Amino acid sequence: MSMMIRLCSKSKDPPKAMRMFNELQLDGFVEHSKPYNSIMMACASTPVYAPRTIDYWHLMHMKDIEPDQVTYVAVLKACA
């Protein structure tokens, strides 16, 4: 499912990616960095949704999920 979110990122469709992420969250599959990285990259891919990347960054920290290199790239991309 994380791969589907990545595909939404490449097609610049953050709303669809956010819906998929929410489904993953309801099923309990977002307790590691990969789904967060995918949704953050999807949001960072368009200027309108870039601020949402920071929201997901904060959510990740609140859940004590360790960021990795891709996480930092997504945050930098959103801020650029």
Image (cartoon, rainbow, N blue to C red):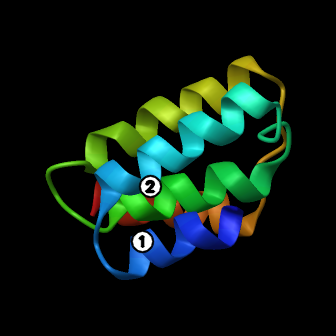
Residue 43: percent from left, percent from top: 36, 55
- Neighbourhood count class around disc 2 (C-alpha, 10 Å): few under 14, some 14–19, many 20 upward: many
Residue 29: percent from left, percent from top: 82, 41
Is the residue 58 above or below the residue 48 in the image? above
The image shows a total of numbered marks equal to 2
Residue 39: percent from left, percent from top: 52, 53
Taking the spot 84% from the left edge, 26% from the top edge, the residue there is: 64
User: Contact, CB < 8 Å: mark 1 with mark 2?
Assistant: yes
Q: Three-letter amino acid code at disc 1?
A: Ser
Q: Three-letter amino acid code at disc 2?
A: Ala
Query: First in sequence: mark 1 or mark 2?
Result: 1
Q: Quadrant of the C terminus?
A: bottom left
* Corner quadrant of residue 59: top right
Secondary structure found at label 1: helix
Q: What is the spatial separation of the Cα atoms under label 1 and label 2, in whole angstroms?
A: 7 Å
Secondary structure found at label 2: helix
Taking the spot 85% from the left edge, 36% from the top edge, the residue there is: 31
Identify residue for label 2.
17
For residue 16, side relative to residue 48 (left or right): right
Q: Quadrant of the N terminus?
A: bottom right
Q: Nearer the viewer, residue 17 or 76?
A: 17
* Corner quadrant of residue 10: bottom left
Identify residue for label 1.
9
For residue 35, side relative to residue 27 (left or right): left
